[in-house]
Amino acid sequence: MKNVIVYYSFTHNNEKLARFLSEKLQCEKLGIETVKPRNGFSVFLDIFFKRTPTVKDLGKSLAAYDHVTFVSPIWAGKIATPMKSLLQKERGMVSHYSFISLCGGAPGQEEKIERELVSLLGKQPDAHVELTVRDAIAVHENGKIRATASQYRVESDELELYEPQLRQFILDHSVVEVE
Ligand SMILES: Cc1cc2nc3c(=O)[nH]c(=O)nc-3n(C[C@H](O)[C@H](O)[C@H](O)COP(=O)(O)O)c2cc1C
């Protein structure tokens, strides 16, 4: 089974998650880059005006893989706009896919994101998981770390906190053994 991870990350949380998963699944990962680099203001404008930024070519055809794992933040209750651009571009090229996000977390969000995925790609994901940074923040509460869910930067070793969810996610979408 040929897997690939395709990720977008603005502040590096999902980049760390993509690296972690590519090590576990022993597969390559491809990062999404926007033609015009995003900053806080352009992210805000993308969300406000429902714009999708132009993204660079991935350099590989997703049709060559049996399974694609998309890794992305969630912005304002939607898939981050650069990932949305990529999904629009790749519709029809993806046979099986899964979606995972390291996000702030919000009630009812998973159902909304699932509907967005189906509308963008025309099919259900094999697996869909949202890991919330609130879980990492909670571990630090005694250490007096104060951060909102949208500010918090997860350290690579904190990804172990999500071990049960990550293990299930990998089992749900792949025949590859977890190390
Ligand atoms: C403008 C903005 C809007 C956000 N909106 C949401 C949201 O609606 N739901 C959510 O779960 N997280 C939300 N977040 C939190 C991000 O998903 C979270 O910080 C994520 O870990 C960032 O990933 P990255 O470091 O890979 O860019 C938002 C973050 C930003 C910057």
Image: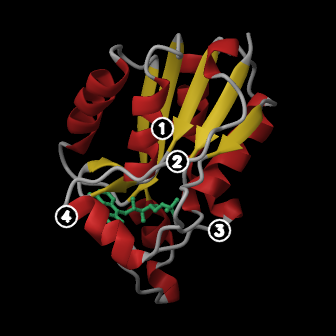
Whichever of callouts 4 and 1 sits on the residue coming sooner in the sequence is 4
Q: Which residue is mark 2?
A: 55
Marking on residue 155: 3
Q: Earlier in the sequence, mark 1 or mark 2?
A: 2
Can residue 164 be spotted in the picture? yes
Q: CA distance from mark 2 to mark 4?
A: 19 Å
Q: Are marks 2 and 4 in contact (CB under 8 Å)?
A: no
Q: Which mark is residue 86?
A: 1
Circle 4 sits on which residue? 48
Q: Is residue 135 above or below residue 160?
A: below
Quarter of the render that holds ligand 1: bottom left
Label 3: state its secondary structure: loop
Q: Alpha carbon of mark 2 to alpha carbon of mark 3: how far?
A: 27 Å
Q: Residue at x 45, y 71 (%)?
A: 137
Q: Amino acid at mark 1?
A: Leu
Indicate the amino acid at tag 4: Phe
Q: Element at badge 2?
A: loop
Q: Residues within 10 Å of mark 4 (few under 14, many from 20)?
A: few
Disc 3 residue type? Glu
Question: In the rendered view, does 51 fall on the left or right side of 177?
Answer: left
